[in-house]
Amino acid sequence: MFQQISRLAPDAILGLMAKFRADSFSHKVDLGVGVFRDLTGNTPILECVRRAERNVLAAQTTKSYVSAAGREEFNTSVEELVLGATHVARREKRARTVQAPGGCGALRVGAELIRAATPSATVHVSDPTWGNHAPLLGSSGLRLERYPYYDPVTHELQFDGMLERLDQASAGDVVLVHACCHNPSGADLAPDQWRSLIELMRRRRLVPFLDLAYQGFAEDLTLDVAGVRLVTESLPEALVATSYSKNLGLYRERVGALTVVSESESQANAVLSHVLQIARSIYSMPPDHGAAIAACIFADSTLRADWITELASMRTRIKDMRLLLTERLRAATGTPSFDFIQGQHGMFSLLGVSAQVVDRLRERHHIYMTSDSRMNLAGIMPNNVDYVAECIASETRDGTL
Ligand SMILES: Cc1ncc(COP(=O)(O)O)c(C=O)c1O
């Protein structure tokens, strides 16, 4: 059997991580891997998570199965966090949420649901988008197309191009939108752009699929879901894939959820039956431990308040580094060419340089980023920012991008 298959090229990010580990230079800089880092370079376990984990372990009396939908109290809290407690779809019993193994699990289950409901649907994803979207959504057999979203050279959103392209989509097609902190560009839709997009989706009968992996990383837990709430209040149907990898730092525990809003309560029940069958057929049940921790934090007012404080400090750290890097790049290059970094959202920005410059930054200066020049701002520290800015300036000084 296995004589027929040949070895695949390594995953680009995992390959980059291996190169970074093998690099013996003492001041090497990792801007590649998409995890939060504190000022010591560590990806911390949040204090609220440590305390909730102790509570969970102390209260646990069994390791028996939970269910394909995961923990009910977790799912309810997710809906309240994402849609808001009084959302019209919740009042009308049109929303259903199931726990999933991370945002990736939620995206994959969502894709299978779309495939089951409308096998001919095309999913439109932003250009550029997170590298795992195509494999996650495409492996369900759905067709993918890209809509213009962000120009890494001008550093501007291509909103007119986006609307123009989506205006040609077929009824029943799906539009995948990053809810906030667009990965990899850090460029998000403004409120009036969300409204124009909703109008177009309504007119063309398109279904939104919102990817919410960074709630709380742009402004706060509420402002970051303003787009999600507007979409789900305005349109009859929507899917939302939520991840708690970043905002609770629960990466390896695999905590996420899929929320589906349907047009009526009976359709919502039918949708739920499919979602549960899909989950059963892929992984049967989501892992419990991380969701138990998350549910404990969401339900306990002290832990929740502590989480909000810790989340704010992660967000502030990234914003501080955006400001610092922008300032140092302005000083090192003597130009405002990189000022765009400061105002973008979340962990990532695209430096906007070619793969050759990315290679030179790695080979000559031991600064690691993905070939599209995506930088993780959480890899910037006060003690490496000057070095990073000087190296970027030296590699782009002659106007090379
Ligand atoms: C845009 C986006 N969506 C979804 C995810 C899913 O994350 P996870 O499966 O680790 O929860 C990520 C993680 O990097 C992401 O960047």
Image (cartoon, rainbow, N blue to C red):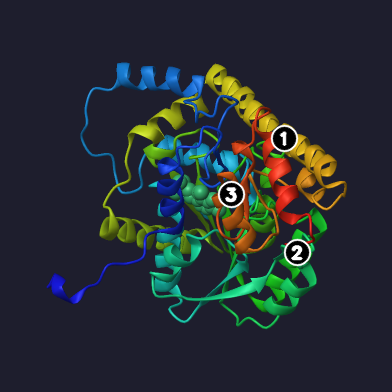
Look at 61% across and 37% down and name the residue there: 378
Give the residue pinned by disc 1. 386
Closer to the eye: label 2 or 3? 3
Return the residue nearer the eye: 67 or 362: 362
The reply to whether the C-beta atoms of the residues labelled 3 and 1 are less than 8 Å apart is no
Amino acid type indicated by mark 3: Arg
Mark 2 is surrounded, within 10 Å at the Cα level, by few (under 14), some (14 to 19) or many (20 or more) other residues, namely: few
Which residue is at the far left? 1
Whether the residue carrying mark 2 lies under 8 Å from ligand 1 is answered with: no
Secondary structure under tag 3 reads helix
Image x and y of residue 233, in percent: 67, 55
Secondary structure under tag 2 reads loop
Return the residue nearer the eye: 384 or 216: 384
The reply to whether the C-beta atoms of the residues labelled 2 and 3 are less than 8 Å apart is no
Look at 45% across and 58% down and name the residue there: 12
Whether the residue carrying mark 1 lies under 8 Å from ligand 1 is answered with: no
State which tag comes first along the sequence, 2 or 1.
2
Give the residue pinned by disc 2. 153
Amino acid type indicated by mark 1: Asp
Look at 56% across and 50% down and name the residue there: 362
Mark 1 is surrounded, within 10 Å at the Cα level, by few (under 14), some (14 to 19) or many (20 or more) other residues, namely: some
Closer to the eye: label 3 or 1? 3
Relative to 251, is 364 on the left or the right?
right
Please state, as top left, top right, bottom left or bottom right, where the N terminus lies in the image: bottom left
Image x and y of residue 216, in percent: 64, 37
Image x and y of residue 342, in percent: 78, 43
Return the residue nearer the eye: 323 or 125: 323
Please state, as top left, top right, bottom left or bottom right, where the C terminus lies in the image: bottom right
Return the residue nearer the eye: 181 or 360: 360
Amino acid type indicated by mark 2: Val
Give the residue pinned by disc 3. 364
